[in-house]
Image (cartoon, rainbow, N blue to C red):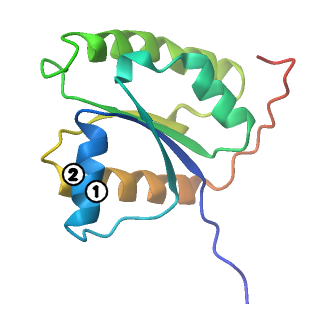
Amino acid sequence: MAVEYQPKIVGFLCNWCSYAGADLAGTSRICYPSNIRIIRVPCSGRVDPLLIVKSFQQGADGVLIAGCHPGDCHYSEGNYYARRRLALLHTLLEYIGIEKQRFQIQWVSASEGKRWANVVSSFTEDLARMGPKETTLHKETV
């Protein structure tokens, strides 16, 4: 019997909104795939693009950044910085051989547990359709 492919996802979640949204999904018993490994960060603006590349280098099939909705950032404009910085990362990822669909930025507030579950479910399904990441990044690449 063949084992179905399950993608490995690393999620960097803003402490104030997205992490609380994921927590709400859990406490509300809203089911979503357990493929995601969550890393709690103070703000989506604090996620260094090299952490994303490192995640792929260490075997992640997908990386998700989730933060407060634009205009609702606890630190005023951290998510604006994240959006600008991480938009440029798509070009770098394609250059090093990672499809841009393997990296997502989403805005999820603390009251959006259902939305969180939908985001993770959709991303997991997309990655499962794509299959395992074929590119192997070496330390010399970064």
**Secondary structure of residue under mark 1:** helix
Q: Which mark is residue 118?
A: 1
Residue 26 position in % (x across, y down): 29, 63
Above-or-below relation of 2 to 107: below
Residue ID at (54%, 59%): 129
> How many numbered marks appear?
2
Residue ID at (20%, 54%): 113
Q: Which mark is residue 105?
A: none
Q: Which mark is residue 115?
A: 2
Residue ID at (60%, 53%): 8
Mark 1 and 2 residues: CB-CB less than 8 Å, in contact?
yes
Residue 16 position in % (x across, y down): 24, 32
Residue ID at (84%, 23%): 139
Tell me: 110 left or right of 133: left
Above-or-below relation of 41 to 32: above
Q: Amino acid at mark 1?
A: Asn
Q: Quadrant of the N terminus?
A: bottom right
Residue 18 position in % (x across, y down): 28, 39
Locate residue 46: give its quadrant: top left
Tell me: 96 left or right of 107: right
Q: Amino acid at mark 2?
A: Arg
